[in-house]
Amino acid sequence: MSPKPWYEKGLRFECTGCGNCCRNHGEYAYVYLSDREVAAIAAHLNLERRIFRERYCVIDDGWTVLRMDQPACPFLTAENRCGIYPVRPKQCATWPFWKENLVESEWNGPVKACCPGIDKGPLYSADEIERWARETDAEVE
């Protein structure tokens, strides 16, 4: 039996709409895209996949990632909203419940410093949190 996670009683999170998670934060500046996500976003933007990849993506260590060479995601609007929300990547939809964020020092350190919604809002169970983390990893595998 695995030891219980430090967040076994759940974690609180509520999106405040600040857009901080869509801004470049050094090591948090990678949004990985699956082929399915590339196709969905390209279709949403009415672009050929090749054109979408050329304009908005780079290849990093074999992975397709959104180009984050600006201070923020290219789809973050001036109103701090996602310009591709209906087809946003799974990684974006599951923030902040990523496997690497579920280390207590990460959650209470850089994640909390970045995100004012940490420790606010509804309480999510450990089971929900771990399911989202698994889904995020599975999307780009």
Image (cartoon, rainbow, N blue to C red):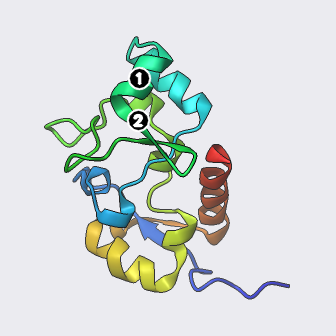
- Quarter of the picture holding the N terminus: bottom right
- As displayed, is residue 97 above or below residue 102? above
Mark 1, Cα crowd under 10 Å, few <14 / some 14-19 / many 20+, is some
> Toward the viewer: 86 or 52?
52
Q: Mark 1 points at which residue?
A: 52
- Mark linked to residue 57: 2
Q: Which residue is pictured at 47% across the width and 19% down the height?
A: 50
- As displayed, is residue 120 above or below residue 40? below
Asked whether, in this view, residue 82 is left or right of residue 131, the answer is left
Kindly tell me whether residue 117 is visible in this rendering. Answer: no
Kind of residue at badge 2:
Cys
Q: Which residue is pictured at 29% across the width and 34% down the height?
A: 75
> Toward the viewer: 61 or 30?
61
Residue 84 x/y as whole percent: 37, 29
Q: Which of marks 1 and 2 is nearer the N terminus?
A: 1
Whole-angstrom CA distance, mark 1 to mark 2, is: 7 Å
Residue 49 x/y as whole percent: 49, 19
Asked whether, in this view, residue 79 is left or right of residue 82, the answer is left
Q: In the orientation shown, which residue stands out farthest toward the right?
A: 1
Count numbered badges in the picture. 2
Mark 2, Cα crowd under 10 Å, few <14 / some 14-19 / many 20+, is many
Q: Which residue is pictured at 65% across the width and 51% down the height?
A: 135
Q: Which residue is pictured at 54% across the width and 22% down the height?
A: 39
Q: Is mark 2 on a helix, strand or loop?
A: strand
